[in-house]
Image (cartoon, rainbow, N blue to C red):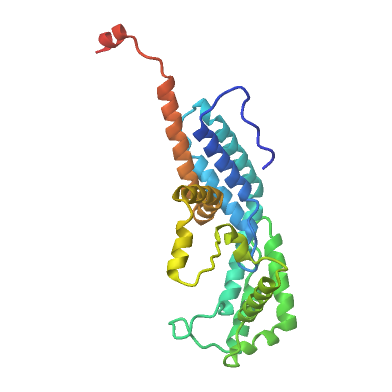
Amino acid sequence: MGIFPPPSPGIPRDPLLIWVETKVRQAIRDSVNHRSRKPYAWGGLSGYEQLEAIAQGLDQIQGTNPENNYLHWLQTRVAKVLARNRNAADDMERAHQVLSQIAGCLHYPPPKPGSQLDLKVDSQQVAQKISALIQETKPDGKIKRAQSRLLKALKKRWELFGEELLFCYDIPGLPQDNLKLESLFGHMRCHQRRISGRKSTRELQDFGQVQLFFTASSHQELLEQIQVIPHEAYLFHRSRLAEAELPRQFIQRLHHDPVATISTLIHYHDVCCQNLIRLKAPAIPREQALHTL
């Protein structure tokens, strides 16, 4: 996205406008930093979709108010980036659709036992579906790099390890993945780190600033220890904690519904601009007002 220009020096601006512009700029920066959780969550594709939502929100800017110049500049920059990367994003999206088709052929993730989707399939049916998918699927679009690499990797691994991947469909109780085993190893590793003190776990990193430890032999003694803390001090530190959580909550809302989040920011910006216009409007002389009436 390039370097964002600083605000014009020497021109006082409303703090709410600056806050909205900062949040929009933060949302744009976040779109290029999405994490990829293979194989189904691709950070580049989700970041491009978030940038499209930001552009859709910036299109809602109304009027030619000078206070909107910075957002108009952001709108132009976002549109250029989207146009420059649209072909690559289409290629990634089609490759992601092919990956979803592969998962459907493999019946992955497996449905819960007893559900309507819990249909028994054997290795021959899965092998036929994968072979047909490899033969029928062809890269589409102007840029086919991601699709070609995905299909090439699928064909190569299917020829090398296809038969070894199908035992789980014929042997009852054999899972399709080792996620539960990896989860068990993860819990054991975190427990070992916790008791050894070598490295803090993610839970302690996220909630360590709000943990309190008391030593009490009864509930009454515990209550007395808690009541020693002044109520004003509790409210002060609680407000600081809530303020520290605001950036994370904004990013969470942005990832959950980027269109609504950006639209809300633009609405705040428009309302603030309208209020500033009313305040800056010159007062009509009394004689002119009477003549108009």
Q: Which residue is situated farthest in the left direction here?
A: 293
Residue at 61%, 53% in the rendered image: 47
The quarter of the rendered structure image containing the C terminus is top left
Instruction: From the viewer's side, name the closer residue of 278 and 82.
Output: 278
Q: Quadrant of residue 181?
A: bottom right
Horizontal arrangement in the rendering, residue 155 relative to residue 241 (left or right): right
Residue 288 seen from this side:
yes
Instruction: From the viewer's side, name the closer residue of 2 and 287.
Output: 287
Residue 41 seen from this side:
no
Q: Position of residue 168 (x, y in %)?
A: 61, 88
Horizontal arrangement in the rendering, residue 34 relative to residue 60 (left or right): right
Horizontal arrangement in the rendering, residue 278 relative to residue 41 (left or right): left
Instruction: From the viewer's side, name the closer residue of 208 and 292.
Output: 208
Q: Position of residue 259 (x, y in %)?
A: 49, 49
The quarter of the rendered structure image containing the N terminus is top right
Q: Position of residue 6 (x, y in %)?
A: 65, 32
In the rendered view, tell whether residue 157 sits above or below residue 35.
below
Q: Quadrant of residue 186?
A: bottom right
Residue at 69%, 68% in the rendered image: 150
Q: Position of residue 52 (x, y in %)?
A: 56, 49
In the rendered view, tell whether residue 134 sits above or below residue 30.
below
Horizontal arrangement in the rendering, residue 114 relative to residue 251 (left or right): left
Q: Which residue is situated farthest in the top direction here?
A: 287
In the rendered view, tell whether residue 22 sits above or below residue 89.
above
Q: Which residue is situated farthest in the bottom direction here?
A: 171
Q: How many marks?
A: 0
